[in-house]
Amino acid sequence: MNIGIIGVGRFGSLLEKHLSTDNTVVTFDKGDPGEELILCDLVIFAVPNKILQDIVYEYQPFISSDATVMDVGSVKVLPCEILQEEFSDRALGTHPLFGPDSAGESWDGHKMVFCKLDISDERYTAVKKVFTARGITAIESTPEEHDKMMAKTQALVHFMGRALSGIEEQEISTPDYGNLLKMMEKVTNDTWELFFDIQNLNPYAEAERKQLITKLQSLEEQIHDDQQQRTT
């Protein structure tokens, strides 16, 4: 398959590294000429969600009408709306649940979400096979289902991980503290751009954050109440 990857950041580079082993891969960064895209069977947008619309407009004129188009963003409702509007029945949304730190050498055993949208079964199967052939487990979901779950499993983890920024390894600590350190280190290795995309572009993330903050405030009040009872 001839694959075009638009976006050569950390994740775009990871895609190029693995997909080029048995495909012809060309990469494009913002502003690069897009003429070679006409030869691509599959075009992958590996750019931040907040600039996806602009990048689509920039490169759409060069993309073949026969090419399948997909994104790999961590939010799915908004990107899927953009891709469907611009590419109709040849677009799908995906979210690899891994990154350069966790799957730099192998994708085997990792998971990837596929939002089929209106794409034909033939196109969908062909794209999915590119990834499952590398040991990836495909999870099928609607964009809404994806974002609702990721608001809990990703947005909250990144929120808590950033809040823990600055904690350090201590000589006296429990294994649980070590787990917190690992979470903080993985989350803070990602860019702030990704963090804000996860929080601001997922339509369900704010409600989850507010619920967490409310629970933390409630716990603080319970601790204060217990202290008061102990001193009376």
Image: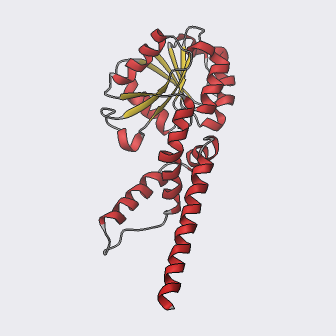
Q: The N terminus lies in which quarter of the figure?
A: top left
Q: For residue 224, what is the image quadrant? A: bottom right
Taking the spot 31% from the left edge, 74% from the top edge, the residue there is: 171
Pinpoint residue 71: horizontal percent, then vertical percent.
54, 27
- The image shows residue 41, relative to residue 97, as above or below, that is above
* Colour setup of the view: secondary structure
Pinpoint residue 27: horizontal percent, then vertical percent.
51, 25
Decide which of 166, 122 is in the foreground and name it.
122
Taking the spot 58% from the left edge, 30% from the top edge, the residue there is: 29
Taking the spot 63% from the left edge, 20% from the top edge, the residue there is: 84
- The image shows residue 5, relative to residue 88, as above or below, that is below
Pinpoint residue 156: horizontal percent, then vertical percent.
52, 51
Marker count (numbered): 0
Left or right relative to 62: residue 136: left
Residue sitting at the far bottom: 232
Decide which of 118, 12 is in the foreground and name it.
118
Pinpoint residue 127: horizontal percent, then vertical percent.
44, 18
Decide which of 43, 32 is in the foreground and name it.
43
Taking the spot 54% from the left edge, 12% from the top edge, the residue there is: 67
Decide which of 29, 135 is in the foreground and name it.
135
